[in-house]
């Protein structure tokens, strides 16, 4: 049996999406492709809460982040990078690579962005760009992008948000929140294999891109937007992934965004209840815990990655490990995209069996019972 994925990307692909991608390819310089791209933009606008122009790049999420930076940050531009984990760090690194005068605010792995501290920075100095992560996958923390957008609007900075692991799994209101550039990718809550980055940008951001002096070629967003006006791409796109994304968005919108978000929150609550019942410690408090991925401290006596390997090889359930300073110390359970209550109960059951094999003391079935209690009451 195939390994079941409970990692924060790639995530399981619905059969309907896999089937759509398996059909004969269409040419990318055709009317069919133009209609497909137009439909994708319309559907993505609904999911991201924007009326802005959206371009789709054939690259992983990092390519979308690099495109945002390459098109906005010229050498010497003041950039404020808000770091709450690995992906915040990556954004800061990118801005440095493109010559930005980058000030990094480190909030600590496991903490959220402190808006008061950010306001202090924005008051003291004029920044062209503020970089932030919506759902910090490495620490399972959600940052308050709405609150941040109020600040960047007030102080006149462009807000660029990494929504790679949030889009499709939790609410995003790009226009209402004042986000100027939003980047996401295909392989997480959007339920498509890896390979597409999605970049939405406000009118202000598109104007700023025209003035940017950094070199760019494949990642030139203005070129992508120009082609997109005819619903085309400058280079050969990953046509089958475009087709898959179209089908996945159709599924998401047919279910209804509210219902999809509610499901993610419910699964997160079930996982958290199970973890507590097992006597394990959650990475972050409920208040800002991610609805799409849950981080758990490994028991002191057990190395997280050994536990994960055991669970993967014996039960075919792949959990994610810790990254950076959390490596070997935490494991993460993703409940992102095409997962339901039964999938999560299976993953939790495998986790219990793994813990049992490592001699961890707990009552077998107690985690499952508490997860089921949440699902029975609220599901
Ligand atoms: N940002 C976040 C928040 C992510 O979770 C990821 C992927 N784990 C990325 C960026 C990078 O995306 P990719 O691996 O597709 O380049």
Image: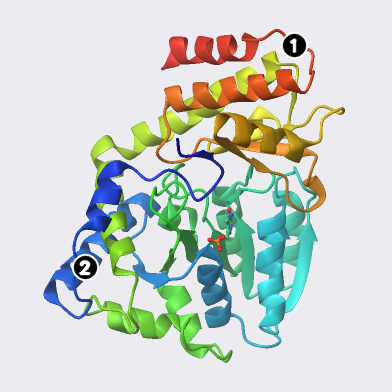
Task: Give the quadrant of ligand 1.
Answer: bottom right
In the rendered image, which residue does mark 2 sit on?
A: 25
Q: Residue at x 68, y 88 (%)?
A: 75
Name the spot of residue 48 as percent of width and height, x first: 39, 54
Q: Position of residue 73 (x, y in %)?
A: 61, 81
Circle count: 2
Q: Is residue 365 above or below residue 299?
A: above
Would you call the spot at circle 2 few (<14 residues within 10 Å), some (14-19), or many (20 or more)? Answer: few
Quadrant in the picture for the C terminus: top left
Q: CA distance from mark 2 to mark 1?
A: 52 Å
**What percent of the width, then of the height, locates residue 195?**
44, 64
Q: Is residue 362 left or right of residue 91?
A: right
Vertical arrangement, residue 163 with respect to residue 94, above or below: above
Quarter of the rendering containing residue 187: bottom left
Q: Residue at x 69, y 18 (%)?
A: 276
Secondary structure type for disc 1: loop
Mark 1 CB within 8 Å of ligand 1: no
Mark 2 vs mark 1: which is more N-terminal? Answer: 2
Q: Along the horizontal axis of the image, is 267 left or right of 127?
A: left
- Decide if residue 124 is in sight here: no
Q: Which residue is mark 1?
A: 362
Tell me the tag on residue 62.
none
Q: Is residue 47 visible?
A: yes
Residue 146 versus residue 344: which sits nearer the camera? 344
Q: In terms of image quadrants, where is residue 225?
A: bottom left
**Secondary structure beneath label 2:** loop
Quarter of the N terminus within the rendering:
top left
Q: Residue at x 57, y 74 (%)?
A: 66
Q: As rendered, which of 126 and 175 lies closer to the eye?
A: 175
Is 38 left, or right, of 322 in this rendering?
left
């Amino acid at each position: 049996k195939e390994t079941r994925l409970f990692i924060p990307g790639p995530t399981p692909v619905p059969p309907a999406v896999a089937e759509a991608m398996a059909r004969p390819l269409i040419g990318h310089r055709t009317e069919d492709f133009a209609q497909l791209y137009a439909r994708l933009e319309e559907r993505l606008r609904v999911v991201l809460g924007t009326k802005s122009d959206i371009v789709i790049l054939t690259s992983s999420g990092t390519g979308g982040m690099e495109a945002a930076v390459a098109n906005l940050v010229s050498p010497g531009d003041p950039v404020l990078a808000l770091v709450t984990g690995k992906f915040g760090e990556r954004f800061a690194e990118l801005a440095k690579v493109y010559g930005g005068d980058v000030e990094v605010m480190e909030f600590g792995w496991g903490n959220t962005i402190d808006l008061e501290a950010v306001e202090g920075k924005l008051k003291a100095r004029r920044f062209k760009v503020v970089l932030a992560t919506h759902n910090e996958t490495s620490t399972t923390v959600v940052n308050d992008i709405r609150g941040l957008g109020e600040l960047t609007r007030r102080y006149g900075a462009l807000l660029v948000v990494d929504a790679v692991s949030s889009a499709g799994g939790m609410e995003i209101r790009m226009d209402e929140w004042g986000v100027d550039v939003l980047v996401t990718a295909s392989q997480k809550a959007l339920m498509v294999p890896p390979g597409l980055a999605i970049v939405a940008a406000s009118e202000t951001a598109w104007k700023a891109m025209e003035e940017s002096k950094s070199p760019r070629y494949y990642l030139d967003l203005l070129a992508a937007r120009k082609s997109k006006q005819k619903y085309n791409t400058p280079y050969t796109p990953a046509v089958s992934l475009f087709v898959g994304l179209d089908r996945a968005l159709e599924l998401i919108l047919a279910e209804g965004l509210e219902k999809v978000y509610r499901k993610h929150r419910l699964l997160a609550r079930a996982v958290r209840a199970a973890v507590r019942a097992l006597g394990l410690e959650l990475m972050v408090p409920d208040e800002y815990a991610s609805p799409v991925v849950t981080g758990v401290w490994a028991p002191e006596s057990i190395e997280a990655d050994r536990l994960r390997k055991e669970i993967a090889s014996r039960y075919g359930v792949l959990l994610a490990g810790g990254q950076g300073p959390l490596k070997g110390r935490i494991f993460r359970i993703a409940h992102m995209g095409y997962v339901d209550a039964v999938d999560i109960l299976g993953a939790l059951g495998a986790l219990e069996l793994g813990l049992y094999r490592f001699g961890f003391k707990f009552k077998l079935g107690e985690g499952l019972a508490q997860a089921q209690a949440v699902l029975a009451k609220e599901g």
